[in-house]
Amino acid sequence: MKHLFFTLILLIISTLYARGQSTKTTPMLDSLYRLTYTNYSTGIGLSYADRLIEEAKAIGNTQYENSAIQLKAGSYVNLGLFPQLQSLADSVEVNRFRAKSPATYYYVKFILSQSYNYQGKYRLAINVAQELYDDSQGYEDETLEYYEDGQVQPPLKTGNRLNALSCLGTAEYCMSHWEKSIEYYEECIAIAQKWPKQLIAELRDAYDGRMLASLKLSDNERKLRYIKEFEDFLVEYKKSANRPTDVDENYAMFEFYIYDGYVNAYTAIGDYDKAKEYAAISRYTLSTITQAYNNIAGTFYSTMAKYAMTIGDYRKAMIYADSAAYYNRDFDSSSELEALKVKLDANHMMRNFNADYDIAKRILTLSDSLTAEMKNSNIDEISTLLGMDKLKIEAQETEMRNHRYLTIAIGALLLSIAAAFSYIQLQKRRRERDMRQLLSEQNELLAQEVARQTSELRDKNEEITTQNEVLFVKNKIISESHREMTDSINYAKRIQRALLPDINDLQNGLGLEGIFTFYRPRDIVSGDFYWGRKRDGSLLLLCADCTGHGVPGAFMSLIGNTILNEISSHSEYIAPSDILRMLDAQIIDALNHGENLDVNDGMDVALINLNPNTLQLDYALARRPIYIVRDGVLQEFKGTKRSIGDRDERSCELSFEGGTIQLQKGDSIYIFSDGIADQFGGATEENPHGKRLKSCGLKTLIQDIATLPIEQQHNTFSQRFDKWIGDCPQIDDITLIGIRV
């Protein structure tokens, strides 16, 4: 619900604010402005805005330039382009818009604060909004401004105060500080009520925000009072000729939240007849809404689920809660989590314990995700706030340093003049008549020298200033490039992780004791990957170590995964050795397609096919072994000394031979990449860089964990391996898969 709340406020305010900036000038600028405004919050509109800025700058029309910047800022936040909005806000700071174009400066600040609310960075939103609030002192003495088209725009300080209160109320609402949020909206109402006709849209949004915050309180009388006040206001609002005509379609949304609030309040009071009556009205209002329907439907079903739980209709509570979770899934994870908790309670009350596990599992996954997002958001907020403080300190230090240099220069100049004057006076006493002309010449020379040195000092200062500005821009470009590169690689990481098979799905229905994976990339993305398929009651599982790591290795892993999916799509059974031969041929073809290149990049692979019914294990190996532990004894099966994709002539003579092992119940199988054995660790004072674990160390570690239940092996292996690494850096990607039959 909170995301729709942001959108309603921001879309209306940003559009109306930009419209008020229109003014008559050249036909070209008029046309560009209409195209920009008509295509507001679209990619085409952003292109028109950039062109309008360039054309307005060329002829010195600051009003159209400012209008384009304001439309651009609003479009960025409505489209979710928060990095671009941050860059625009930074350029406004650099160009000192606060003095040159204060309306544009404060408007972009307002949009930036609301964007932080969108991103869940509420402390940053409060930090920026507080600046708007502090700079709006004295707004009481201002009067409204009118435009030629009849639109009304609050004066600068009044607009800053209203925008700041809106941002602060939203941030406190999202941080669950309901009383604080209500205080800000009530102050906003008090200001807008001074001009109820002209600021009717701002007054409506403040009433709406206060009502939504009050629904979180336990004081039911206040809930009903604020709902009733907003309902009465909305009746008059719909009759008013001063309302914005382009937001009539939002009436149903506001009415829905009023009726939904009544259901909430009367359910809490225990007046279930009233709650049922308003639930029916709320359902009908929902059916008339087309804009943002999914988000509003999530709110409706959440309220109905709580109502059904309260009256003891647990079956309907289950149905409503399930619908609420579905509609909130893509918009509001916290509301989805709340709905799932209601569903779990209703399911439990119906004594349907068999479904408890799946619901609780989804709740736990969603809670972990929300916790991680909150931690990351808090880290980003703290880093940004610290960066702001650092910039302020550096600016103060620079100002103090410049002031000190200026004082020293003036003092030196005064000392030079005093010394020259003393010398002139001494000479005058000795040779008054003859030295008059000499004194005049010396004064002239002194003036010329002072002028020359002053000019040189001014030129040096200008050069230093220019260099500092260039350095600042370069640093911004480098920082932006680094951030974009990191975002791209992180996105690639999500894609790569999504391609890895779900181990739980692979082992379901096969009768195995269990499977675990230990997967740890050295960089953000990995050159290691694992792949698996179930076919005819058997498990086909592969562990691969691609050439390189990081981005190059990740590309190789994607190529390998794609080829394996294509090979496994055949309906007939393919032996592991044949799969490796097909994989080898297609890797070589993929890496040399259309190029006369001698590429030897490839991958080392361990591939197994396990039949849990017959306990037969077929395998094919390319430079990677298989370890099997039976009754505490480890057996090693080595592979062909040739990599997949190897173009060396001598290596190509070797074929990928397969093998078969007859397993026994209780046997443990392990396949892995070489990153574990190659890892340095065990550092001491005598050997601070440590030593490699090697194959013997890995074998000992596997023998130690093989006796444990399969579900404990992952944690024990991870703890032992981390203890071994200590402070040594990870040098390669690491993957290990363990299976017990």
Image: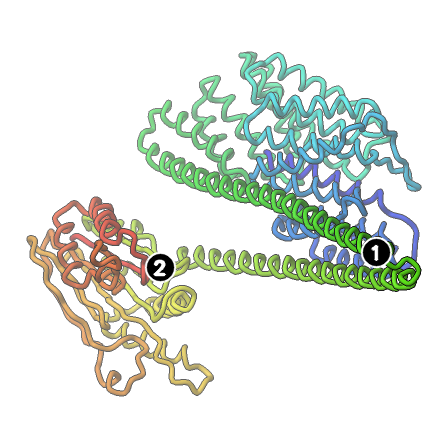
**Left or right relative to 686: residue 329:** right
Please, what is the three-letter code of the amino acid marked with disc 2?
Arg
**Residue drawn at (63%, 60%) of the image:** 471
Q: Position of residue 42 (x, y in %)?
A: 70, 53
Q: Position of residue 448 (x, y in %)?
A: 84, 63
**Residue drawn at (56%, 25%) of the image:** 177
**Residues marked 1 and 2 touching at CB (< 8 Å):** no
Task: State whether residue 34 appears in this view.
Answer: no
Q: Check disc 1 and report its element: helix, strand or loop.
A: helix
Q: How many marks?
A: 2
Q: Nearer the viewer, residue 20 or 262?
A: 20
Task: State whether residue 520 appears in this view.
Answer: yes
Query: Which residue in the protein does label 1 denote?
Result: 424
**Left or right relative to 331: residue 514:** left
Q: How is the image coloured?
A: rainbow
Mark in front: 1 vs 2: 1
Please, what is the three-letter code of the amino acid marked with disc 1?
Ile
Q: Check disc 2 and report its element: helix, strand or loop.
A: loop
Q: Quadrant of the N terminus?
A: top right
Q: Position of residue 710 (x, y in %)?
A: 19, 47
Q: Is residue 281 above or below residue 244?
A: above
Q: Is residue 168 above or below residue 407?
A: above
**Residue drawn at (32%, 55%) of the image:** 520
Q: Residues within 10 Å of mark 1 (few under 14, many from 20)?
A: some
Query: Which residue in the protein does label 2 denote?
Result: 522
Q: First in sequence: mark 1 or mark 2? A: 1
**Residue drawn at (61%, 28%) of the image:** 283
| Real-space Cα separation, disc 1 to disc 2, in angstroms | 77 Å
Q: Which mark is residue 393?
A: none
Q: Position of residue 423 (x, y in %)?
A: 80, 56
Q: Residues within 10 Å of mark 2 (few under 14, many from 20)?
A: some
